Image: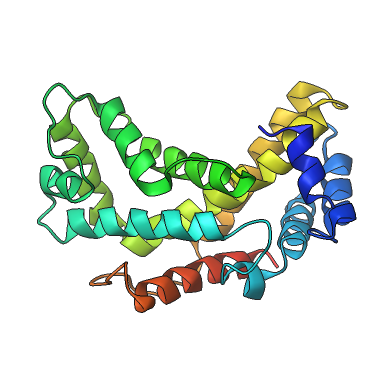
Amino acid sequence: MGTSKSLSNVKGKSGVMPNWPALSNAVTRSCDGTTLTPERLSNITRHYVEAIGGSSTAGRGSSKVVGRSGINTAKRLGTFFSAFSGGGNNIRQALAETGLTDLTGKTVSDVIDHLIQYCSGETSTIDDRAAKEASRRLLEELVSNASSIEEIEVLLEQSFSFNTSEDLIIKYFGYYIYEHLSILLYEHLVSSKNEGDCQGLFRQIREFIVERLVDMQKRNPLHEIDWSSEEGDRVIKNVYQDVLTVFE
């Protein structure tokens, strides 16, 4: 979940994350094996948003440490979701629009791996890794229980019967926040704390993030969006900024 070298590249001493100490201290103090109150969990996520530059900066892709890869991946996810829901819930057509035209011999895992690569590409930075792991988490949650391409279609259709694309993009950004925070801090923390306590802490952080976003006000309908346009870029940044604002 991250490396000491990665941490050294983003710590406050480099000037990139001047609010790093407050975030690091909040996480370290909370790793004590207890069940954290909502207030303590909120304190962690608030320090995280401050450390990345605040919602108005990071949410527009202007943070030096996070945002750009997450925004680009979210636009690709939006493209796939729109292709599926706007194309009569036809998974083969939607996959073809992402470049996967030959499904001969393809497994569900192959399809998920293709979509992760389509959405996130190669990874070279912490931001890239967080975006890719968040897309993996969301896509596996949606369709990993399928045993065939046809079942992927059924599961996605069921998901869109009670979720909008905005709901899913909001959840993606929640996972993105969690993955970025994990990569920044987990390995550093586990070197000095009990591993079980670390796992318990980050599980609580993930659950807190997801729960806080369930009732988030939806303000950015994503149907009929051209994801390659300036409007698509603006709208996806609006969603990300709104998500970060929840935790400020």
Residue sitting at x 79%, y 27%: 190
Which part of the image, by quadrant, shows the C terminus? Answer: bottom right
Residue at point 35% right, 55% down? 76
Q: How is the image coloured?
A: rainbow
Left or right of 57 in this view: 163: left
Residue 160's x, y, as percent? 25, 54
Q: Is residue 26 left or right of residue 134?
A: right
Q: Position of residue 235 (x, y in %)?
A: 41, 74
Q: The N terminus is located in which quarter?
A: top right
> In the figure, is residue 144 to the left or right of 36?
left
Please say if 21 is above or below 194. Answer: below
Among the 4 quarters of the image, the one containing residue 147? top left
Image height check: is 62 above or below 124? below
Q: Nearer the viewer, residue 241 or 39?
A: 241
| Residue found 66% across the figure and 65% down from its top | 63
The vertical placement of 60 against 135, above or below, is below
Quarter of the image holding residue 53? bottom right
Q: Is residue 105 left or right of residue 166?
A: left
- Residue 114 in the image: state x and y as whole percent: 30, 36
Task: Mark yes or no: residue 231 visible.
Answer: yes
Viewer can see residue 214: no
Residue 195: percent from left, percent from top: 76, 22
Residue sitting at x 32%, y 41% = 115
Q: How many marks?
A: 0
Please name whichever residue, 235 or 45, is drawn nearer the observer in this view of the structure.
235
